Image: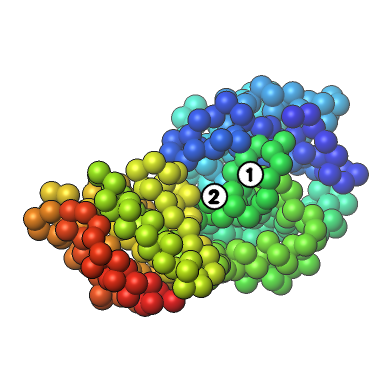
Amino acid sequence: MMQKSLTDKIYYIGVDDKEIDLFEGQYVVPNGISYNSYVIMDEKIAIMDTVDIHKAEEWLSNLKDVLKGKAPHYLVVLHMEPDHAGSIKKLVEQYPSIQIVSNQKAFQMMEQFFEDLDVANRSYVVKEGDVLSLGEHSLTFVTAPMVHWPEVMVAYEKSQKILFSADAFGKFGALDTEEEWDCEARRYYINIVGKYGAPVQALLKKASTLDIQKIFPLHGPMLVENLAYYINKYDIWSSYKAEDEGVFIAYTSIYGNTKKAALQLKEILLQKGAKKVAIADLARDDMAECVEDAFRYSHLVLASPTYDGDVFPYMATFIHHLKSKNFQNKTVGFIENGSWAPMAALVMMKEMASLKNMRLIEEKVTIKSALKKQDIIALEKLADALL
């Protein structure tokens, strides 16, 4: 992507990555990802973060087009994750006089990532509330630990009222992708930042004291209007509230019998007036999207056959993801299947009971091998308990 002007002196020099198959080695990104980077052209020139090393040459070309022969004074590093900090060394090789502006924790990580980079002699250490003056523009630094690494900070540019928000307010998808922000921003947030709701709430509290008119994240589009909408979404997600009143049915099935029960429950719920019912096959649908939907809806149903006296492996993986992301504040129902010793519901209930503020529907549905008439009655009762 070519550089573009965002204000009269702030430029976008980031790049789209359409070749990537898995973001962070695990998340499917069908529309790629953007690595965002910015330049503030003032009396002192500041670059806001770098990009993944695989896109370094394109990024450096964009930077060169903006600089027009000038040398940058500062590289501001808000986050040390390699998709944003991976090109630090290449930048220093191009501009050896540049100073790197970041916090002490980030510099410690920098030395870990770049063994032969002289960090000490070009480090400009900042902390909470410090201001870096560039001329007409100034950057005030606000620490944001565990959103979603411990060294993360954001920067507020006062003259243009811009929050450079690091990974906060980011989303999957290259910038040339035309799609609604919500879905891929939610999937990004829940799966990457989701565990750290309390730190996000702390950052939102700090941000509320600033006059923010634009948000420039490290992934996804720059947010320049209707900011209350995006901030409200982050408040919902980070406080573990249900975003939508509805039921998400997550199932695994070996020979299709548990699937039939899950589909039957969906049908019953809709007939009884459920506002929204989403359903997913944990073995075939995107696991990250399944985790996203579990957080999104007010009610969850787990449906699994018994497998080796436990749950089916994909269900075990799903529950592991929920627990690791601090899943809480939900109503959960259970469907199990078993031909000789149904155990799945007991296992799933025990896992869910270990989480915070969960309402578990104790009347589980137990199917023995195949779905039968009496099972429909049990599914009706489960549906009533969910509504």
Left or right, residue 279 beside residue 359 = right
| Viewer-proximal residue among 324 and 340 | 340
In the rendered view, tell whether residue 164 sits above or below residue 67: below
Q: CA distance from mark 1 to mark 2?
A: 10 Å
Q: Are marks 1 and 2 in contact (CB under 8 Å)?
A: yes
Left or right, residue 167 beside residue 314 = right
Mark 2, Cα crowd under 10 Å, few <14 / some 14-19 / many 20+, is many
Viewer can see residue 371: yes
The quarter holding residue 353 reads: bottom left
Label 1: which residue?
Answer: 219
Image coordinates for residue 385, horizontal then vertical, percent: 37, 77
In the rendered view, tell whether residue 375 sits above or below residue 362: above
Ranked by sequence position, the earlier of labels 1 and 2 is 2
Residue furthest to the left: 340
Left or right, residue 211 beside residue 125 = right
**Can you tell which of label 1 and label 2 is closer to the viewer?**
2
Viewer can see residue 129: no
Under mark 2, the amino acid is Tyr
Under mark 1, the amino acid is His
Residue at (57, 26) in percent of width and height: 19
Mark 1, Cα crowd under 10 Å, few <14 / some 14-19 / many 20+, is many
Label 2: which residue?
Answer: 188
Say how many tags the image has. Answer: 2
Image coordinates for residue 287, horizontal then vertical, percent: 41, 46
Residue at (44, 76) in percent of width and height: 387
